[in-house]
Image (spheres, rainbow, N blue to C red):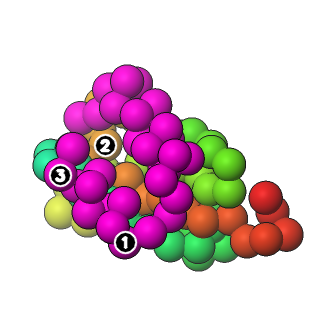
Amino acid sequence: MMTPEQLASVVEQVEQHGLADSNLTDLRGYFPELHFTWCMDDDVCGPQPAAQGKGFNVYLVDGSNHCLCFTPSLEAASGVVIAELGEDND
């Protein structure tokens, strides 16, 4: 489960510190109950982002049914995908 405040904090953290492996490590430390993944936004097909930041989108992942799937639900979210926008999409 994720709260709206946690989602806002993730967006703020990425906007302040950028998309870097070290920042993902920090996010994992701040939110140990959530799984974090970083990819390019064009690798994500279908869902609408749960949040958007400068140069990236944030998607939520639900892993409760033994298979990972995207979810729009904060209550079902067990993970976060931070998807970097290409230079053409900033």
**Residue 37 appears in the figure:** yes
Which element is circle 2 on?
loop
Q: Quadrant of residue 40?
A: bottom right
| Residue 5 against residue 51 in the figure, above or below | above
Residue at 52%, 46% in the rendered image: 16
Which element is circle 1 on?
helix
Residue at 37%, 72% in the rendered image: 21
Q: Do tag 2 and tag 1 residues touch (Cβ < 8 Å)?
A: no
Amino acid at pointer 1: Asp
Q: Which residue is mark 3?
A: 29
| Residue 41 located left or right of residue 73 | right
Magenta-colored span: 1-30
Q: Does the magenta-highlighted stretch encompass residue 8? A: yes
Residue at 66%, 73% in the rendered image: 42
Location of residue 66 in the rendering, given as x and y in whole percent from the top left corner: 18, 63
| Gap between marks 2 and 1 measured at Cα | 22 Å
| Gap between marks 1 and 3 measured at Cα | 13 Å
Which numbered disc flags the more N-terminal residue, 2 or 3?
A: 3
| Residue 7 located left or right of residue 88 | left
Amino acid at pointer 3: Gly
Location of residue 57 in the rendering, given as x and y in whole percent from the top left corner: 60, 52
Which element is circle 3 on?
helix
Report the disc number at residue 21.
Answer: 1
Which numbered disc flags the more N-terminal residue, 2 or 1?
A: 1
Determine crowd level at label 2: few under 14, some 14-19, many 20+ residues with C-alpha closer than 10 A. Answer: many
**Residue 71 appears in the figure:** no
| Residue 30 against residue 85 in the figure, above or below | above
Amino acid at pointer 2: Ala
Q: Does the magenta-highlighted stretch encompass residue 72? A: no
Classified by dominant secondary structure, the portion drawn in magenta counts as helix
Report the disc number at residue 49.
Answer: none
Report the disc number at residue 77.
Answer: 2
